[in-house]
Image (cartoon, helix red, strand yellow):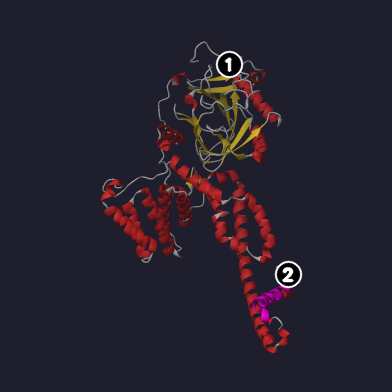
Amino acid sequence: MQGSFSEIVLSFLLIACVANVGRCELFTSMAHLQTALYAERDIAVTLKNYVENEEERLRKIKRLAEDLEAHSIKALEKPDYYLANPVNAFLFVKRFTLDWSKNVDHLLKNDSSESMRRYVEYYRQDLPTYEDLQGSAAALMRLQDTYKLDTSKIAEGTLGGVQSTQLTANDCFELGKLTYNSEDFYHSSLWMEHALEKLATQENKQNESDLRAEMLDYMAFSEYRKGNVKTALIFTEELLTLEPNHERATNNKRYYEKMLKDKEASEYARGEDGKTLDMDPVENDYRRSHEFQSYEALCRGEQIMEIKNNHKLACRYRTRNNPLLLMMPAKEEDVFLDPWIVMYHDVMSDSEINAVKGLATPKLNRATVQNSKTGELEVATYRISKSAWLKQDEDPVVAKINARMQAITGLSMDTAEELQVANYGLGGHYEPHFDFARKEEKDAFKSLGTGNRIATFLFYMSDVAAGGATVFPYIGVKLFPKKGTAAFWYNLYKNGEGIYNTRHAACPVLVGIKWVSNKWIHERGQEFRRPCGLYAEE
C-alpha cells in the first residue's frame, strides 16, 4: 500500500474537514472532539473493511495470476497447435477484451496498486483489443459460412482434430451480440438460438432467468430484422412470460401483431410460415454470385467441374541448363494446362523458411489492396492477413531464394517486386482477385516503371491442417498448402493481355497457421526471356 497508516488517517480527516468546513478546528469544542472520536471509530471500521476487501481482491488477483500462468504454460507448450484452433484463438482474444473488462479491470483499479497497474497497462499494449474481438468474431462467422459448419460443432470446439475449450452459453451469447452489433442478424439468430439451448442444459442456474430474457430480446429482434415476423412474435411472447412488464417487448408485440394483420403483410410474408426477407450474410449480389459460390465450394474441397485434359498433365525435372539446377533439378508438376499452372516440390528448405519468417515477423503489418479507382493502398475486409517485404540484399537467404526462382522460371528477378511474406491469422483469407492490372487500371504499377505483373511465384511455408487453399474459381483448380512447395503461373499472355482465368483466392484458414511468400514478376526485363509469339493468343 502507498503511504503510511498515519497518512491514510490524515487523508480521511482532511476529507472530513472538506465536507464540514466550519468544524475543522476541533480543539475549540469538546463536542467536536467527541465527534472526532466517532469519526476515529468510523475510520477504523472503514479501514478494516478496506483491508478485508483488499485481501479478498488480492486473493482474486492471485487466482487470476495462477489461471493466466497455467493457461500460458499449457498453450506455450505447442503455441502453433493451440492457436491453430480458431475457437481457442477467439477465446484467447475474448479473455483479454470482454472478460478483462468484466472480471479484471475493477480488481486492478485501486490506489495502492497503481504502480502494478502501470506495468499491466504497458504489457496490455501487446494484447488484443475490442477491434480484435470484433474481428475474431467475424472470422468465426466467415469460417462457419465458407465451410458450412454447424453452430454446435463450433461451440464444441472440435475443428479439424484440434480440440479447444467448449463455448459456454454466455460465450455463445456474446458471439450473438457481437454479430448483432454488426447488423449480421443471420448469425446473431444462429448463436442466440444455440445460447438458449446451452443455457437450458447448463448446471449453474444462477441468473438464468435474466440471461434468458436478454437472449430472447436479441433473438426476437434479429428474427424481425431477418423478416421472420411470426418467429419474432413467438420469441417476444416468451420473453413477456418471463418479464410481463417489459416495455419494449410489449410495444414490439403490438407492432408485430399489427404487421401480421395488416393488409400489406403479403409483401413481407413468404408462404404460410410468415417468413419474409432472408437477411443472411450473403445478402449482397456478389456473395450470391456464381464466382463466390464456386470459390467457397473449392475451399471446401468440392469438385465443381471436370478438369479437361487431365491425361496430359505430367511431372518432370526442370533444369533449363542453369548451373543452380543441374545438381538439384526443380520437381515440376502440371496442375492445369490452359492457363498453365504448375507446382514445384521441395523448393524451400525448413532452414530457409525459418530464416524468412524470422526476418519478416518484426515487419508484419496489415496487408493492403490497391483501390482500383484511386490507385491508393488500403486495408479491406476481403483480405485478412499481415505481410512484410524483404529486399534482395536484406539477407543472403533472400538473394538465394530470388536466384532459385529466376533459375526455375527463366524470368529475370531484377524488375520483380520484393519478396512478400504473408501470415494469415484467424480465418485469414483473400477473396477472388487478379494479380495483374486490368486495362482500366492504367496507373496501377506506374510508380514502379516495370510494366504489368507477368507472373506469380507463390511459396507455401507451412502446412495447414484444414482450409487455406489457393483456388481458381473459373477453372476449378484448388491448391492445398504443403510446406516447402510452390505454385507458379503466368498472369499475362505473350502479347501482354491479361489471362482472366487466373483469377484466384486464398481460402479462409480453418485450422492451422498459414505462412506464404510470393514474388510478383513484371514485364520489363523479360523481352528476350519470354518474347512475343507469332499469334495473339499465345
Q: For residue 344, what is the image quadrant?
A: top right
Start-end of magenta stretch: 7-22
Amino acid type, mark 2: Gly
Q: Earlier in the sequence, mark 2 or mark 1?
A: 2
Which quadrant is home to the N terminus?
Answer: bottom right
**Nearer the observer, 311 or 224:** 224
Where does the image place residue 176, in percent across and percent down from the top left? 45, 52
Residue 88 visible: no
Measured along the vertical axis of the image, is residue 330 above or below residue 115? above
Residue at (68, 66) in percent of width and height: 112
| Secondary structure beneath label 1 | loop
On the image, numbered disc 1 is attached to which residue?
A: 530
Residue at (58, 51) in percent of width and height: 129
**Nearer the observer, 104 or 219:** 219
How far is the residue under mark 2 from the one under mark 1? 78 Å
> Which label was assigned to residue 3?
2
Our reading of the magenta stretch's main secondary structure is helix
Where does the image place residue 134, in percent across and percent down from the top left? 52, 49
Q: Is residue 92 left or right of residue 23?
A: left
Residue at the outermost front position: 22
| Secondary structure beneath label 2 | loop
